[in-house]
Amino acid sequence: MITDLDFQAPSVSDCSTSRLISVLKEAGQDHEFYPTTDEIIRCLVADVEARSESRLYSWDDRKLTSVLDIGAGSGKVLRAFRDLGKFTTLYAIEKSPILCQRLDSEIFIVGTDFWEQSLLSKQMDVIFCNPPYSEFVGWAAKIIREAGSKVVYLVIPTRWEGRTEISEALKHRDAEATVIGTFDFENAEDRRARAVVNLLRVEFKGDKDDAFDRLFDEQFKELNAKFSGKKKGGDEGDNEPERIGADNRAKMFSALVPGGRYPERMVSLYNDEMDHLRKNYDLVGQLDVSLLKEFDVTPKRVLECLKARLKGLRNAYWNELFGQMSIVTNRLASKKRRKMLELLQRHAEIDFTVSNIEAVIGFILKNANKHIDEQLVEVFEQMIEKANVYNYKSNQKPFVEDRWRYSEEKPTHIALEFRLVVEHTGGLRHSYEFEKGLQENAAHFIGDLLTVANNLGFLCNTVDPRLAGRGDTGIKSWESGKVETFYMTGKDAGQPVLEVRAFLNGNIHIRMNQKLALALNVEYGRLKGWLGNGAEAAEELGDKNAAAFFGNNLQIGAGNLPMLMG
């Protein structure tokens, strides 16, 4: 089902804009891709920076930090915001899977098909859009009506002023539109066009929830009319549908079998719940006003309840989907795992659609694979001590411990011995401490080393009970100097992967499986750019078996996810 996640455009990451446009056309994904010009971006960034410094758009004295680009293309505008050094949270809505692949890993995709997205839940500081010009009126009107930000910037043709949809949207939000520049694409550096455009700044006078509040007022006119004493209007609602709410959600989730159509079935359940929710809130507006007042039901209470229910519903479905991705999160070391899970939880309010699921999974895989490589380097470098390493065959440079530890100069072209003494990760808790066992950082380190081993193909239990708690309970079986052996699983079950001795002085002694040490050295050298191929690895490390481990560090693809297979 998720075929786009596996699509790799030829040389897209390095190709010119003209080649990229050709690739997009060949794939049927050229959705009027006209990158914003450098001139427009400079004007945009200067205006945002000036108004940010004046705190015109701050909430609770906080500075602007988040920006959403709708139709982000290859991320050109978002990179400009990132380079300001102030915008730490970058979001994109982009329909083309090819362009999504070009987005930097820190850019979070919060939607794909623009018309499927509700901007009401996307609370950003700044929203920018350079829409397809054949649809600019509809795009601009929807963005203005739904934007959950203080300011929106639009790059739209100069004829926008005569369009009723846009003027009505501005009136609906009580918004002020200001032209801050007029430009053309005649000499655009990326893709030329006969288009004269305005860079338009749209400012909203209400708070961030103003769009939701105004939409609520429109859709619940009956309820508002009753409490304001006006005559009720509208048709009779449907009978209450069969209950689909949270009471049965866990049962419905458990009945889903992971497979190729899992996302579609999840979205179908979500849409059923959304329909149920909408119909029930419609019915509230049809109740007698005296009865509503008796139960202390007011439009304000209904509005707050609706916001909470919508947020909870999205969170429930995204969290269930994320729960099916343990094959990804279990491959991450402790810090990377926490970072990934926190990131997912923070963005669980994205509209729950099939195309958004594809985009989010693509984002997760891209970042997970980046983290898997980074954590190998980090774990390796935790073990670098003078007594723990040896030089590559071609490296005659002496290891100077003080120089690299306390300066920017790091040792290069080195490999780890399989017997190690690690002095800076913590050991056992002292006898006078309430909790016995490993210190928290020691437990994390051993767990992370096991995770790296697992990713290199040395299958083992990365959540071994002896590491349980990791700072909460500890396992009392650990004794100073006593060997604890961690074994491989699967076809190599029973073979040691690590032998560990922890001490009260804070040191840890490790004896790695020799093949694991070799694999770790090969992949560290590859990731650092010191080893270019397997033959070079065998030569530099002095072991003919090294070539077999070149490129062995795990990379996860959509085909590895059980929920998408079948």
Image (tube, helix red, strand yellow):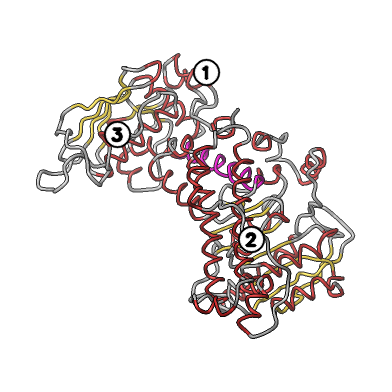
Q: Position of residue 485 (x, y in %)?
A: 25, 25
Q: Amino acid at mark 1?
A: Ala
As drawn, 303 above or below 355: below
Q: Amino acid at mark 3?
A: Lys
Question: Horizontal placement of 275 versus 471: left or right?
Answer: right
Q: Position of residue 342 (x, y in %)?
A: 45, 51
Q: Is residue 366 magenta?
A: yes
Secondary element type, mark 3: helix
Please, what is the dominant secondary structure of the magenta stretch? helix
Q: Position of residue 51 (x, y in %)?
A: 61, 76
Seen from the viewer's position, the closer of residues 152 and 13 is 152
Question: How much space separates mark 3 and mark 1, taking CA atoms?
Answer: 27 Å
Characterize the local packing of mark 2: few (<14), some (14-19) or many (20 or more) Cα atoms within 10 angstroms. some
Q: What label sits on residue 279 in the rendered view?
A: 2
Q: Which residues are magenta?
A: 354-374
Question: Horizontal placement of 366 versus 323: left or right?
Answer: right
Q: Is residue 132 magenta?
A: no
| Residue 417: quadrant of the picture | top left
Please give the residue where the numbered disc 3 appears in the rendered image: 386
Q: Amino acid at mark 2?
A: Lys
Characterize the local packing of mark 3: few (<14), some (14-19) or many (20 or more) Cα atoms within 10 angstroms. some
Please give the residue where the numbered disc 1 appears in the rendered image: 535
| Residue 147: quadrant of the picture | bottom right
The answer to whether the residues at label 3 and label 1 have Cβ atoms under 8 Å apart is no
Question: How much space separates mark 3 and mark 2, taking CA atoms?
Answer: 69 Å
Question: Disc 3 or disc 1, which is closer to the eye?
Answer: 1
Seen from the viewer's position, the closer of residues 121 and 410 is 121
